[in-house]
Amino acid sequence: MEFSSKLLEKAVNEMAQLPGIGKRTALRLVLHLLKQPAEHTHFLAGALTQMRDEIKFCQSCHNIADVAVCEICSNPARNHQIICVVEDVRDVMAIENTNQFKGIYHVLGGKISPIDGVGPSQLNITSLVQKVQAGAVEELIFALSSTMEGDTTNFYIYKQIKDFSVKTSTIARGIAVGDELEYADEVTLGRSILHRIPFENSLKNN
Ligand SMILES: [Zn+2]
C-alpha cells in the first residue's frame, strides 16, 4: 500500500495492529476520523490512554475495575462462598447479563494453552487455590468455554483443590462445544448456570 503521507501511513499501521483489522479497514477508519472534527480523534485517543493508564484489576477476583476491589466483590448482598471461575471480563459481563448468578467471580485471565505459550503460572490460579485452601469457598463453578484449553484448565485447577472440602461444578453444556461464553444467549447461559452439574460428571462424559 503506497501512502501519500507518512503521518497517514503511521496511523494506519498502528490501527492495523488491532485484531481483526486489516490495512484496508484501518485506512477506512483513519479516513473516517479525518472527516470528523478533530475533537473526535482527541476524545478517542484520550479515552484509550486514560483506560490504559488508570485501569485496575480487582485485588480479589482480578476482574477489570476502576477501584482496588470491584463492585461485585465489595457487594455484601453477593454470596462470597460461591465462586464462578471464568476466563476474562467478557465472561463476567455475559453471566451478569443473565441475572441468574448471585455469587462472585474469579477471573483467570486466559486458559492454559501450551501452543500459545500460556502456562498455569501466567494465569490467576494460585490466588484461587489459596482462597479454597483458606476454607472460604463452598462451591467453585467452572465456566470456561468447552474447548480443549478450557477443559485442560478446569482439570488443572480441579486437581489442586479436589482434596479440600469444596464442591465443584461445571455449567451445563447446553452451550455447543467450542462456543465462547460471550456468544451464548442470555437465557441459555442463565439456564446453564442454574442447572450446573458436578464437575466429576463432566469428566466421565469425556
Ligand atoms: Zn472483584
Image (spheres, rainbow, N blue to C red):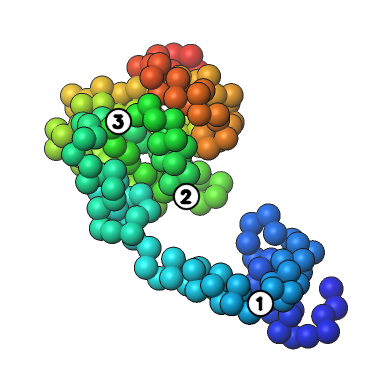
Q: Which mark is residue 118?
A: 2
Compared to residue 187, the image places residue 136 above or below, namely below
Separation of residues labelled 3 and 1 (CA atoms) = 44 Å
Whether the residue under disc 1 has CB within 8 Å of ligand 1? no
Report x, y in % for residue 54. Answer: 37, 68
26 sits to left or right of 185: right
Report x, y in % for residue 93. Answer: 44, 41
Residue at image location 75% in from the left, 62% down from the top = 25
In this view, the mark in front (1 or 2) = 1
Whether the residue under disc 3 has CB within 8 Å of ligand 1? no
Closer to us: 122 or 143: 143
Instruction: Tell me the SS state at disc 1.
Output: loop
In this view, the mark in front (3 or 1) = 1
The quadrant holding residue 129 is top left
**Outermost residue toward the right in this view:** 2
Q: Mark 2: which amino acid? A: Val
Separation of residues labelled 1 and 2 (CA atoms) = 42 Å
Which residue does the numbered mark 1 point to in the structure image? Answer: 37
Q: Mark 1: which amino acid? A: Pro
Residue at image location 73% in from the left, 69% down from the top = 32
Compared to residue 163, the image places residue 182 above or below, namely below
Separation of residues labelled 3 and 2 (CA atoms) = 30 Å
Residue at image location 68% in from the left, 55% down from the top = 20
Which residue does the numbered mark 3 point to in the structure image? Answer: 102
